[in-house]
Image (spheres, coloured by chain):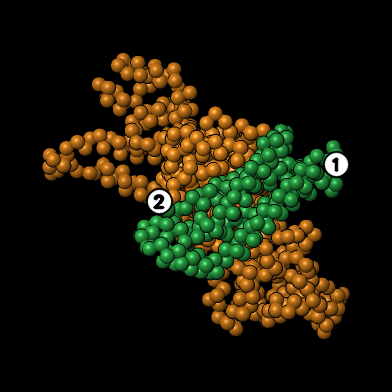
Chain colours: A green, B orange
C-alpha cells in the first residue's frame, strides 16, 4: 500500500541525510576540524574517525546515488495510479493520464533542477573525499597549521558535505499531488 | 577570579539520550564541534575543550533516557518541563539556565536492532515525528514560553530554518542555529551573548536574579550598536556600573575612552564649558583653551548621569552634537567632529517635564535611540542581597581592619525584608557602618545593623514584597487554625484524613524548601552557593539557640511526615535530607528506639503521636 505522506524514499532520505549526514557525520567532521586546530583535545579521535567514521563514506555515497536515481520514479504522483481508486481506471487512460501527471509534476516542482544540484554536490563531495584521503596519506608529521594540508582538505570536504546535505533537504518529503 | 561559563540546557533526543553500557559519542562530537563543556554528569568522555563557550547539561526530553533494543521511547513533556524548572526556579545551588537549546524533531517508537545499530538507544521513529506541524520541540517551546516567558530559548536543529521559522518565532524562540553550516558555532556563541541571561563575568555587577540578568542582557544588546542609550533606575541602583558594563561589552572596548559627567554636581554656569570645552577668553576665568568632556570621549562613551539636571540652555547644543557629531567650544567659532556614544542616566520621570522649562522631547528621543535599559531596584531582586552583603562586609572588614565575621541568618532576613529606597548604595553604606561601628566581632547580628534599618518597611517606599509574603503566611496559619469542621456532613468527612495528612506534610515540606532557599550563600570554595541547613532551621523555627543536631532531627521528622513528592522534586530538600541522615543516622535510630521510653530530646508531638 502506498503511503503518499510517508513514502519509503522519504524514510530512506531522512535516515541518510538527517540522521547520518547532518546529525552525525557533519558534526564529527566539525569536531575533527577543531581537534586539528588544537581547540579540542581527544587523543584517539582522529585515528578512530579516519578508521571508522570516514570509512562509512563510500557505502553512504552509494546509497545517495541510489536515492537520487530513484527519486523521479518513487516520488512521482504517477505512483498514485498504481493504487486504489485510480488503479481501477482502464489501462489506456491510466497510462496517458499518469504520463500527463508525471510531466506536469516534473515541470512544476523543478525536479530536474533539484536532481542536477544534488548530483553535482555529491560529485563535488566525492572528489573532496578523495583529496582528503590523498592528503591524509601524504601528511607529514608536525606540519604547522598553515601547512596542514589535511586541515585544508578536511575543511573543503566538510563544506562540500554541507552543500550536499542542503541540496538533499530540498527534495519534497511526500508525494505531491499536482 | 574564576569566570563562570554560561550554563545551557540542551533538549535533544539524539544528543541528550543516555547510552546503556557506553557513552553518547554523538554528544561528545557535538560538544567538540560547538566548543561546549558537557556537565551532564553521565558521560566519562576524555575529550577536553580548551576554551569552551559554555557548559551544557543535556536532556533527552523523552523516556526512557537510556533505551535498549525493544524499549519504546515516548516524548516526555512534563518530565522535561520539571527539569527545566529545577534549573530555572530552583537555581539556588547552581546558576540558572542562561539559555535553552531546543531540538525540533524527536523520534519516538520502538528501538529496533537496525535503529539501535545506527545510534544506540534511538528508535526508528513514527510517521508524525518529522511533521513540522507536529514537532515535539514546538510543543515544548510553546509550554516553556507560557510558563517562563523570560527563559531564553534558541532552536538548535538540522532542519531548514524556513520550514518552521514563523511558527517558532510565534511560539517564543529567540533564534535558530542550524547544526549544519560552517557558521553554526559562531552563531551559537553570538546567540548566547545576545539572548542568554549571563551574570557579569568581571564581577563588578553582582547578582544572578532574573531582573538583573535581563538588564545586563539589554546592555549587551545595546553595546552592539553605536546609538545613544538611556539608563533608568532608582538612585543607588548602579547606573554607572551598568554603563561601564555596556562599555566593556562593546567591541572593541580596549583603548576606547569612557568619560563620566554628573550633571547634578556641575555648576550650571560652567556646564556648557565642561561639556563642550571653551577657548581662551571665552569668559573671565578662561585663561587657556580647554577641551570638554565630549572631545575627551571622542571614539568612546560619555556617561552623562542625572540628565534631568541638564540646564535647558545647554540642551540645544547637546542636541546638535548628537545630530551632527559637531562640538563647538564656548567662545569658539569653528567646531570639531567627534564620534561619541552618550550613555545617559536618570532616575527622574523626564518625559513628564514641561518642554521649555524641563527636558526637550527631541533630545530625549535622540538619547534613547539605541534603547532604554531599566535597572531593577534592589527590592525587586532580594535573591541578590546575600551575595552583595557578603561582598560589602568583606570590603568593610578590609577597610577598617575588622575581624572576618559571619553574617547571621537574622541579618540576612532583615536585609532582605528592608525595602532599600537607596538601593545597593544604601545597602553598602549600612553594612560599612555596621562593620565600622563593631570591628571586633565575629558574628554580624541584627543588633549591629544601623538603627535606620530597624523598621521592616521604609516609609514612602513603593513596595515590600517580602513583608507581604510573610503576611500571606500569617493568613494561611490563621485560616488553618480557625477552620471549623462543625456542620460538615459525615459523607463529606469520609476518607479525608489521608489527603489532609498528605497536604499538611507537603505544605511543611514546601515551607522548609523555601526556608532552605534563603540560606544558600556563596563562599570562596563554592561561589555558586552553599546550602546552610542549620541557619535555615534557625530561621524556620525562629530559635537562635537551636542546636545543629536538633535541626537535622527536625528535617528527618518532616520528611517522615510527608508522603507528597516535594521531597523528591525539590533538590534542596533532597540534599538537606541526605545530609541530615548522614549526620544523624545513629541518633535517629536512637530517637526511634527511645520513642517508647523517655528520649531526652524527643519532640512533644512525637511523644503524643506515639502514645
The 10 Å Cα crowd at callout 2, few under 14, some 14 to 19, many 20 or more, is few
Give the numbered dot on residue A1: 2
The 10 Å Cα crowd at callout 1, few under 14, some 14 to 19, many 20 or more, is few
> Is residue A81 visible from the viewing direction of this image?
yes
**Residue visible at 61% across and 31% down in the picture:** B44
**Residue visible at 73% across and 60% down in the picture:** B251
B149 left or right of B281?
left
Chain to which the residue tagged by mark 1 belongs = A
Q: How many marks?
A: 2
Q: Residue A82 appears at what percent x and percent y? A: 42, 57
> Is residue B171 visible from the viewing direction of this image?
no
Q: Residue B221 appears at what percent x and percent y? A: 63, 61
A75 left or right of B609?
right
Q: Nearer the viewer, residue B24 or B31?
A: B24
Above or below residue B217? Residue B587 is above
Secondary structure beneath label 1: loop
Whichever of labels 1 and 2 marks the residue nearer the N terminus, that label is 2
- Residue at mark 1: A143
Chain to which the residue tagged by mark 2 belongs = A
How far apart are the two marked residues, 1 and 2, measured between alpha carbons?
58 Å
Q: Residue B325 appears at what percent x and percent y? A: 75, 76
Q: Nearer the viewer, residue B460 or A4?
A: A4
Above or below residue A5? Residue B117 is above
Q: Nearer the viewer, residue B524 or B71?
A: B71
**Residue visible at 75% across and 59% down in the picture:** B253
Comparing marks 1 and 2, which lies closer to the viewer? 2
Determine which quarter of the picture holds residue B223: bottom right
Secondary structure beneath label 2: loop
Amino acid at each position: 500500500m502506498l503511503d503518499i505522506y510517508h513514502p519509503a524514499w522519504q524514510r530512506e532520505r531522512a535516515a541518510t541525510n538527517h540522521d547520518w549526514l547532518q546529525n552525525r557525520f557533519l558534526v564529527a567532521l566539525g569536531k575533527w576540524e577543531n581537534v586539528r586546530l588544537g581547540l579540542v583535545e581527544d587523543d584517539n579521535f582522529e585515528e578512530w574517525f579516519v578508521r571508522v567514521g570516514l570509512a562509512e563514506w563510500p557505502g553512504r555515497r552509494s546509497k545517495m546515488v541510489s536515492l537520487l536515481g530513484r527519486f523521479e520514479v518513487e516520488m512521482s504522483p504517477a505512483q498514485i495510479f498504481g493504487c486504489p481508486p485510480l488503479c481501477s481506471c482502464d489501462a489506456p487512460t491510466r497510462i496517458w493520464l499518469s504520463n500527463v501527471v508525471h510531466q506536469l509534476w516534473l515541470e512544476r516542482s523543478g525536479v530536474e533542477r533539484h536532481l542536477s544540484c544534488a548530483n553535482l554536490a555529491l560529485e563535488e563531495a566525492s572528489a573532496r573525499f578523495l583529496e582528503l584521503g590523498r592528503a591524509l596519506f601524504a601528511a607529514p608529521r608536525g606540519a604547522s597549521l598553515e601547512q596542514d594540508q589535511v586541515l585544508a582538505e578536511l575543511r573543503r570536504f566538510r563544506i562540500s558535505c554541507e552543500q550536499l546535505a542542503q541540496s538533499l533537504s530540498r527534495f519534497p518529503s511526500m508525494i505531491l499531488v499536482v | 577570579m574564576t569566570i563562570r561559563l554560561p550554563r545551557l540546557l540542551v533538549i535533544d533526543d539524539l544528543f541528550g539520550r543516555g547510552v546503556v553500557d557506553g557513552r553518547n559519542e554523538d554528544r561528545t562530537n557535538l560538544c567538540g564541534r560547538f566548543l561546549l563543556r558537557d556537565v551532564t554528569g553521565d558521560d566519562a568522555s576524555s575529550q577536553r575543550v580548551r576554551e569552551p563557550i559554555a557548559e551544557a547539561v543535556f536532556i533527552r526530553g523523552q523516556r526512557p533516557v537510556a533505551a535498549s533494543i525493544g524499549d519504546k521511547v515516548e516524548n516526555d513533556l512534563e518530565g522535561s518541563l520539571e527539569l527545566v524548572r529545577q534549573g530555572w526556579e530552583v537555581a539556588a545551588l547552581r546558576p540558572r539556565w542562561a539559555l535553552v537549546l531546543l531540538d525540533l524533531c524527536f523520534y519516538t517508537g520502538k528501538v529496533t536492532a537496525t535503529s539501535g545499530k545506527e545510534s544506540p538507544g534511538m528508535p526508528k521513529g513514527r510517521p508524525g515525528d518529522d511533521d513540522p506541524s507536529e514537532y515535539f520541540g514546538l510543543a515544548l517551546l510553546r509550554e516553556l514560553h507560557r510558563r517562563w516567558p523570560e527563559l531564553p530559548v534558541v532552536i538548535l536543529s538540522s532542519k531548514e530554518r524556513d520550514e518552521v521559522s514563523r511558527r517558532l518565532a510565534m511560539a517564543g524562540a529567540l533564534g535558530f542555529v542550524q547544526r549544519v553550516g560552517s557558521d553554526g558555532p559562531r552563531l551559537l556563541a553570538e546567540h548566547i551573548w545576545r539572548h542568554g541571561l549571563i551574570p557579569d563575568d568581571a564581577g563588578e555587577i553582582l547578582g544572578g536574579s532574573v531582573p538583573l540578568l535581563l538588564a545586563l542582557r539589554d546592555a549587551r544588546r545595546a553595546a552592539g550598536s553605536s546609538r545613544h542609550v538611556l539608563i533608568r533606575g532608582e538612585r543607588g541602583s548602579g547606573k554607572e556600573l551598568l554603563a561601564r558594563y555596556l562599555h566593556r561589552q562593546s567591541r572593541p572596548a580596549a583603548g576606547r575612552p569612557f568619560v563620566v559627567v554628573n550633571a547634578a554636581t556641575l555648576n550650571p554656569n560652567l556646564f556648557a564649558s565642561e561639556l563642550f570645552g571653551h577657548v581662551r577668553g571665552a569668559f573671565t576665568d578662561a585663561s587657556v583653551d580647554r577641551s570638554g568632556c565630549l572631545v575627551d570621549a571622542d571614539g568612546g562613551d560619555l556617561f552623562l548621569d542625572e540628565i534631568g539636571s541638564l540646564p535647558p540652555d545647554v540642551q540645544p547644543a547637546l542636541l546638535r552634537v548628537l545630530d551632527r557629531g559637531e562640538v563647538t567650544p564656548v567662545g569658539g567659532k569653528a567646531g570639531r567632529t567627534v564620534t561619541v556614544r552618550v550613555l545617559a542616566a536618570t532616575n527622574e520621570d523626564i518625559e513628564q517635564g514641561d518642554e521649555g522649562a524641563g527636558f526637550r522631547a527631541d533630545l530625549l528621543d535622540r538619547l534613547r535611540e539605541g534603547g532604554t535599559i531599566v535597572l531593577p531596584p534592589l527590592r525587586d531582586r532580594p535573591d541578590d542581597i546575600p551575595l552583595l552583603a557578603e561582598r560589602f562586609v568583606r570590603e568593610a572588614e578590609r577597610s577598617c581592619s575588622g575581624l572576618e565575621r559571619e553574617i547571621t541568618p537574622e541579618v540576612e532576613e532583615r536585609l532582605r525584608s528592608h525595602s532599600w529606597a537607596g538601593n545597593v548604595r544604601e545597602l553598602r553604606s549600612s553594612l560599612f557602618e555596621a562593620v565600622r561601628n563593631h570591628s571586633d566581632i565575629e558574628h554580624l547580628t541584627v543588633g549591629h545593623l544601623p538603627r535606620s534599618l530597624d523598621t521592616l518597611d521604609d516609609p514612602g517606599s513603593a513596595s515590600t514584597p517580602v513583608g507581604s509574603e510573610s503576611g500571606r503566611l500569617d493568613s494561611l496559619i490563621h485560616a488553618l487554625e480557625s477552620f471549623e469542621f462543625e456542620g460538615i456532613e459525615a459523607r463529606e468527612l469520609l476518607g479525608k484524613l489521608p489527603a489532609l495528612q498528605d497536604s499538611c506534610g507537603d505544605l511543611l515540606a514546601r515551607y522548609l524548601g523555601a526556608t532552605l532557599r534563603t540560606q544558600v550563600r556563596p563562599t570562596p570554595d563554592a561561589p555558586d552557593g552553599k546550602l546552610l541547613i542549620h541557619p535555615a532551621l534557625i530561621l524556620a523555627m525562629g530559635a537562635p539557640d537551636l542546636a545543629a543536631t536538633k535541626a537535622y532531627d527536625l528535617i528527618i521528622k518532616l520528611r517522615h511526615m510527608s508522603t507528597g513528592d516535594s521531597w523528591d522534586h525539590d533538590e534542596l530538600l533532597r540534599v538537606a535530607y541526605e545530609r541530615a541522615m548522614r549526620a544523624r543516622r545513629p541518633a535517629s535510630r536512637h530517637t526511634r528506639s527511645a520513642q517508647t521510653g523517655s528520649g531526652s530530646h524527643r519532640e512533644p508531638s512525637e511523644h503524643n503521636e506515639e502514645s
